[in-house]
Amino acid sequence: MRARDINKVELVKQKAIELLVEVGFEGFTMNKLAKACKISVATLYIYYQDKDDLILKVGIEEVERMSAIMLENFDPESSFEEGLKQQWKNRAKCLFENPWSAQMIEQLRTSTYQLKVLEVFGKNFKEPLGKFMHNSIERGEIDQMPFETYWSIAFAPLYNLIRFHNEGQSLGGKPFVLTDEILWKTFELVIKALKK
């Protein structure tokens, strides 16, 4: 058995992400990936058992990598506003710098792979964000609420703004570019909605 070539592994991963976004899970094949990488299909099987193994391993690796970016400089002991602002900075940076991976992960979240992907997100975020929420509630900065409510108010506006930016238009088809002014004005509204 041949040894793994790190450069080839990275190329395969990069092309797999791009191909998954472009053609979806149904259109994705090991043959198409090999062709995109300019390698033989047999080479792919050095690295992965099959298509499902490849999708899952690449997806989980990207979730791990992007989770780490989203938690950079985040302190669960910070005030609610400071902590949420750091989360917005991190998430915006991560999504802007990794648009292909973000789109692939979103596809994974709505696929048969979702349980394994969400498990990794849960494992990475549960402790620091759980502690952050607990501290914010204990300090009386925010009310206790279901996690889904919190996430919808705290992060859905950010993700929608980034989606509009990536698509280059708002819901009505009007051209849209996300500026710092729009980003932080939206953040101020989110803070007003959540803080006591």
Image (cartoon, rainbow, N blue to C red):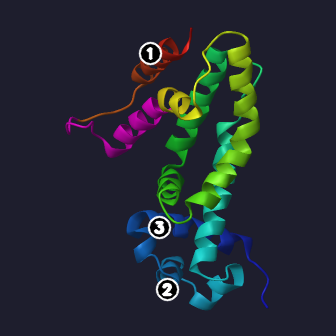
Sequence-wise first label, 3 or 2: 3
Residue 148 in picture, x, y percent from top left: 53, 35
The answer to whether residue 173 is magenta is: yes
For the C terminus, the image quarter is: top right
The answer to whether residue 123 is magenta is: no
Left or right: 29 in relation to 134: left
How far is the residue under mark 3 from the one under mark 2?
13 Å
Whether residue 40 is visible:
no
Q: Quadrant of residue 13?
A: bottom right
Total labels drawn: 3
How far is the residue under mark 2 from the one under mark 1?
48 Å
The vertical placement of 29 against 104, above or below, is below
Sequence-wise first label, 1 or 3: 3
Residue 57 in picture, x, y percent from top left: 66, 67
For disc 1, the marked residue is 189
For disc 3, the marked residue is 20
Of badges 1 and 3, nearer the viewer stands 1
